[in-house]
Image (cartoon, rainbow, N blue to C red):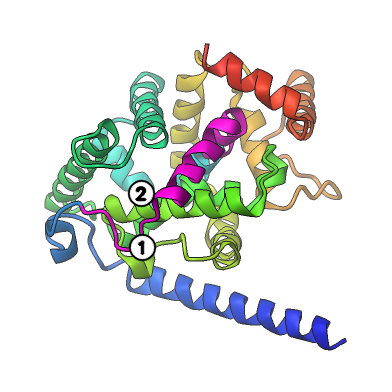
Amino acid sequence: MCQKSSENHQKFQLNKEAKKFLDVLICEGGKSRCDETSEVFRSGMKIPEFYDKEKFKRGQQFFHRNIFAMLFGKFLGLISDLTLISSQKILEHTNQSNEPKTAFKRYVSTIFSMYTWYTYDLIPGSKSWESLKRIRTIHNFASLKCHKNQIGEIAQYHMALAQFGFMGLIVSKSEKIGIFPNQEEMDGFIHFWRVIGHMLGIEEKYNICRETFKETKEICDEIIAEIISPALNEWDESFLKMTRALIEGMWSMMPVLQFKVFLNLLYLLINNNNQDKDVEILQMNYFEKCLLKFLQTFIFLLKFELLRKFMRNFILL
């Protein structure tokens, strides 16, 4: 009883800290810009003091061992980011996410940049380093341009939610997207994104990735419950337009990408795969329903190392 009481108390404390973090992120992070108007951003790109080379390497290796499920989880994470109205406005203003062709170019570029971070050493002058510098420059230009045109700007809040898009579902819903990590792997993955977030200009108090897995997962769970889930249940036409552009733009790389299927799949994932109610936020035809079941079955089968290895080799062909 004492042990159970202690565990419940610890969980309560973690949940309390996660809520506190989210309050700060929304209230303060939404007003704190992440561009050259910020002193922290102007100070330049530096490897943080908390950087641990071995942990960072483990995070990179974890990605490569689970590359298919990782890309799958990140793709769903990017869709979840599109539910945020303030992020939609910034993306719409860049004119790079509104149509399938432009969305394809933008997201393929994002994939290659991310792959570079997962592959090369994080040292000045490396491909990884130069890629991060380029992304910072792009973000800075976009933020200044949006501010000038009174659209808003890229704030710490937007950067943290973008960070969530790349790692949040993988931390919070790992097994439901076909990833079955051990503690060391997940710790390395979280450390990797804590470092990457810092390098891209996220201040430590807004960085979703914390020192421990438990802290980070509680924050990711809180973001899903308080931000992503409500937004996904109240989607607007702008969200549908940008999501369709993303999915149709990426279809040539992965023909299983279907607009209604992936929206429903994300809805199931965010709402803990609750099959006891009507979960179709967009009504599917018979083929789409079959494809959804196929994807769910395939994700389940990723628990087997042989299939993960096959998909890894297939993607890297």
Residue 16 lies, with reference to residue 151, above or below; the image says below
Left or right of residue 49: residue 266: right
Residue at position x 45%, y 43% from top?
Answer: 57
Left or right of residue 173: residue 102: left
Residue 310 percent location from the top left of the image: 67, 18
Which segment did they paint magenta?
46-74
Q: Name the residue carrying label 2.
A: 196
- Element at label 2: helix
Quadrant location of the N terminus? Answer: bottom right
Residue 294 percent location from the top left of the image: 77, 24
Report the amino acid beneath label 1. Answer: Phe
- Label 2 environment density (alpha carbons within 10 Å; few <14, some 14–19, many ≥20): many
- Element at label 1: loop
Q: In the orientation shown, which residue stands out farthest toward the bottom?
A: 2
The main secondary structure of the magenta stretch is helix
Residue at position x 17%, y 42% from top?
Answer: 137
Magenta residue check for 51: yes
Q: CA distance from mark 2 to mark 1?
A: 12 Å
Q: Is residue 167 visible?
A: yes
In the image shown, does 26 or 209 lie closer to the viewer?
A: 209
Magenta residue check for 45: no
Residue 288 lies, with reference to residue 41, above or below; the image says above
- Label 1 environment density (alpha carbons within 10 Å; few <14, some 14–19, many ≥20): few
In the image shown, does 314 or 238 lie closer to the viewer?
A: 314
Q: Name the residue carrying label 1.
A: 50
Residue 317 percent location from the top left of the image: 52, 11
Q: Earlier in the sequence, mark 2 or mark 1?
A: 1
Report the amino acid beneath label 2. Answer: Ile
Residue 282 percent location from the top left of the image: 66, 36
Residue at position x 46%, y 73% from top?
Answer: 21
Residue 254 lies, with reference to residue 278, above or below; the image says above
Q: Which image quadrant for residue 152?
A: bottom left
